[in-house]
Image (spheres, rainbow, N blue to C red):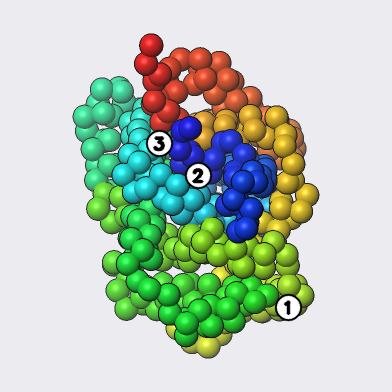
């Protein structure tokens, strides 16, 4: 049996069998495949919406824009990545317990580093050349771009683009390994167990997750040069690490704690009221800046919206998508290719439609359809059928004859 993939298992996930029934087969659920594929495809929607957003200036921005696409971008943004990191944490702990640290590290490094480097060196280089020569109107030969411009882009960290997710995953995997080793060495503490039980009940721990946003904001005020932007040529971003780490830790905890799984599979009543209150607070304090009470309320309310929204997303998939589906199995497998190739497609198709006179709604649909068609075709006709490409862009080893 092969270890699970980089984000989630492509095959249906097997939960641990309940105690007292050692001979019974473990229960299986399928909503992780559905969640992974849909959340990945929402990345295409999000980046397409940025082109026509009235509040964001992206790589490609159409002069005709709408507040609708700003709202669409904002709504997807609050739950998509937090939910991804919960899934990543869950399957990291599952893989560590099932295969051990050595196999976990070997598999995850190949599944992440190989596609990361392949996409950065090939796909992102082509995108950066397009952006430099076409979008920035700085024509040059490809050779000159490679020798004079690209090294500066790599040193500044601009090469990372959408690949920041994979870089952050690598850092979180190191955290997961450390906590896995720590959990094997430390004995259970009853006081801590009682505290955890209180936080677990009705998922009250969700109220603590926004503290990571507050911590990052405080750190950014103290050392802005360190906490703004990426470090080490783009290899490390402290903001991404600090803000999303609680969700990865939640995923680790979720796998280890069957009691938490029971609580996390339903939405407590208090969550709806707090979500509404957080949205109202975010609207009222939208213009609050600095380091004052109003600004802290704005930061905490946004973090709470993200935490509650990711939980609601998780529960909805668990309740309505927990069934086997060949379509979502296929899309789950294809989602890695979609993620790696969609960014350059959205940029190019968005640019090609900039001067078109059609309504922006139709432009948006055209960008989405074209991007999905190209990325799925690349996956189906090239990645799946050519072993070397499957290794380079999906990190799956070439089978030996």
Mark found first going from the N terminus, 3 or 1: 3
Mark found first going from the N terminus, 2 or 3: 2
Label drawn at residue 111: 3
Q: Is residue 333 visible?
A: yes
Q: Is residue 314 above or below residue 26?
A: below
Location of residue 129 (image quadrant): top left
User: Of all residues shown, which one is farthest toward the left?
Assistant: 147
Horizontal and vertical percent position of residue 372:
63, 30
Q: Is residue 224 above or below residue 254?
A: below
User: Of all residues shown, which one is farthest toward the top?
Assistant: 401
Count numbered badges in the picture: 3
Secondary structure, mark 3, is helix
Give the left or right position of residue 30, taking residue 102 as reference.
right
Q: Which residue is mark 1?
A: 270
At 61% across and 46% down in the image, what residue appears? 23
At 58% across and 20% down in the image, what residue appears? 380
């Amino acid at each position: 049996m092969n270890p699970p993939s980089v984000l989630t298992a492509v095959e249906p996930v097997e939960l641990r069998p309940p105690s007292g029934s050692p001979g019974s087969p473990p229960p299986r659920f399928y909503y992780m495949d559905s969640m992974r594929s849909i959340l990945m495809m929402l990345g295409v929607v999000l980046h397409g919406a940025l082109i026509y957003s009235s509040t964001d200036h992206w790589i490609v921005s159409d002069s005709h824009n709408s507040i609708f696409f700003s709202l669409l971008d904002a709504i997807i943004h609050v739950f998509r990545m937090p939910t991804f990191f919960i899934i990543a944490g869950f399957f990291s702990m599952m893989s560590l317990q099932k295969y051990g640290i050595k196999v976990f590290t070997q598999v995850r490094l190949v599944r992440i580093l190989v596609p990361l480097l392949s996409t950065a060196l090939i796909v992102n280089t082509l995108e950066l050349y397009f952006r430099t020569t076409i979008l920035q109107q700085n024509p040059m030969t490809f050779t000159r771009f490679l020798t004079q411009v690209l090294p500066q882009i790599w040193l500044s960290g601009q090469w990372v683009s959408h690949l920041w997710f994979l870089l952050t995953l690598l850092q979180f995997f190191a955290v997961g390994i450390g906590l896995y080793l720590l959990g094997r060495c430390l004995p259970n503490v009853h006081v801590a167990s009682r505290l955890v039980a209180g936080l677990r009940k009705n998922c009250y721990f969700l109220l603590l997750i926004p503290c990571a946003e507050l911590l990052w904001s405080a750190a950014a005020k103290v050392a802005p040069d360190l906490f703004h932007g990426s470090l080490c040529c783009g290899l490390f971003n402290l903001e991404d690490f600090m803000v999303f780490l609680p969700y990865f830790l939640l995923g680790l905890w979720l796998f280890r704690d069957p009691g938490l799984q029971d609580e996390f599979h339903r939405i407590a009543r208090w969550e709806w009221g707090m979500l509404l209150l957080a949205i109202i607070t975010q609207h009222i304090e939208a213009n609050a800046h600095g380091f004052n009470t109003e600004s802290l309320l704005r930061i905490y309310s946004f973090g709470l919206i993200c935490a509650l929204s990711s939980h609601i997303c998780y529960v909805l998939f668990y309740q309505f998508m927990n069934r086997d589906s060949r379509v979502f199995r296929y899309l789950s497998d294809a989602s890695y290719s979609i993620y790696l190739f969609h960014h350059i497609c959205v940029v190019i198709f968005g640019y090609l439609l900039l001067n078109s006179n059609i309504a922006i709604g139709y432009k948006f649909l055209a960008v989405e359809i074209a991007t999905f068609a190209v990325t799925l075709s690349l996956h189906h006709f090239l990645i799946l059928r050519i072993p070397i490409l499957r290794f380079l862009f999906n990190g799956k080893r070439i089978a030996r004859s």
